[in-house]
Amino acid sequence: MFDLRHLQVLRAIAREGSLAAAARSLHHSHPTIAHHLTTLEAHFGARLVHRGPRGTALTEVGEALLPHAEAILERMLLAERETRDVVAHGSCALRVGTFPTAGALLLPPAVRTLHEAGVQVSLTEGELPELLRGLRSRQLDLSLVFSQPGDRLDLEEEFTVHPLLEDPLLLVLPVDHPQAALERVPLDALRTDKWIMGTTDWDPCDRALSWACAQHGFEPVHGMRTDDYAVMQGFVAAGIGVALAPRLGLNNPRTDIAVRPVAGPPLVRQIGVAMLHATAARSAGQLLAALRAESVRIRSRWSGRAGEVHA
């Protein structure tokens, strides 16, 4: 019968490329690594590793076993952490990631629901690449994420993204802009305007804007750059440019700007919760349910205003 140490050795050999390097990574001796590998191979009655002068490589049988070994080790790590949380706090401590706009509006009521149930929540706030790194490194149990329709997030198959909300992308104009009087503004009317855009090339609003402008035969002219929606509103109000922003980021718009939908097909970003399949903590399911309930309330408020952002 094999144990977890045998699976750890197989994973280390696959990652390091040799028995010697695997021994160093696990702080074991070379004979110990060889013994664990031999025991595992005897259990399956097959060679799992090709050994050569330039290192090692998994056999076909070893390649078939590796993902199961990694899943078992990952699940045991989660089990140990969640059990220790229960011993230390009386409940699992849930490590949650969020991006700023969701952290301001969507997440707080859901976290309150968990606090009322006695669940400890550890919060990490960041932009999307940082959150994805936190999920991949297992530093986060789950995270609010966003994407453009049809995009795939850079996550392994061990994760599921549960959809929550379609967040409309809206035009932000100076209140005295010539197009501000329109109920819906055609992008073609803004081809000569400068745009307040995000600070990174992966910004979802900028990608959606560039795609939509390309349908009208022009590229948006870059003006200022900021990821802070309050700063963006200030630049727009000052007449420095116009912008495209998610509705969640415009919860309390200034009175000296105008917020209008884009004429034509709506532009949106999709907001969801990325979660490990192996997350067994009941609190993860509780948070997901609370986020779904809050999303329903937000959609209801938006529908009641018929697309208008101002109260």
Image (cartoon, rainbow, N blue to C red):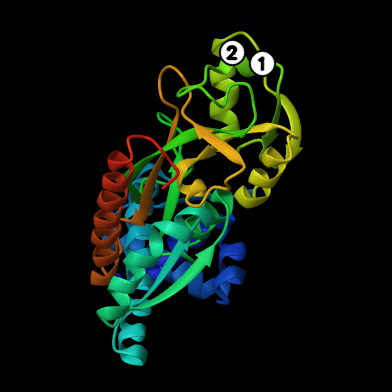
**Residue 38 sits above or below residue 228 on the image:** below
- Dot 2: element: helix
Q: State how many labels appear.
A: 2
Q: Residue furthest top?
A: 217
Give amino acid for label 1.
Arg
Give amino acid for label 2.
Asp
Q: Which mark is residue 27?
A: none
Residue 9, x across and y down, in percent = 46, 66
- Dot 1: element: loop
Residue 303, x across and y down, in percent = 29, 39
Q: Residue 220: in sight, yes or no?
A: yes
Q: Which residue is mark 1?
A: 191
Q: Which residue is mark 2?
A: 188
Residue 120, x across and y down, in percent = 37, 80
**Cα distance between the residues tagged 2 and 1:** 5 Å
The quarter holding residue 102 reads bottom left
Please give the name of the residue rendered at 54% of the width and 19% of the height, measured from the top-left corner.
212
The quarter holding residue 291 reads bottom left
Confirm or deny contact between disc 2 and disc 1 (CB under 8 A): yes
Q: Residues within 10 Å of mark 2 (few under 14, many from 20)?
A: some
Q: Nearer the viewer, residue 233 or 67?
A: 233
| Quadrant (top left, top right, bottom left, bottom right) of the N terminus | bottom left
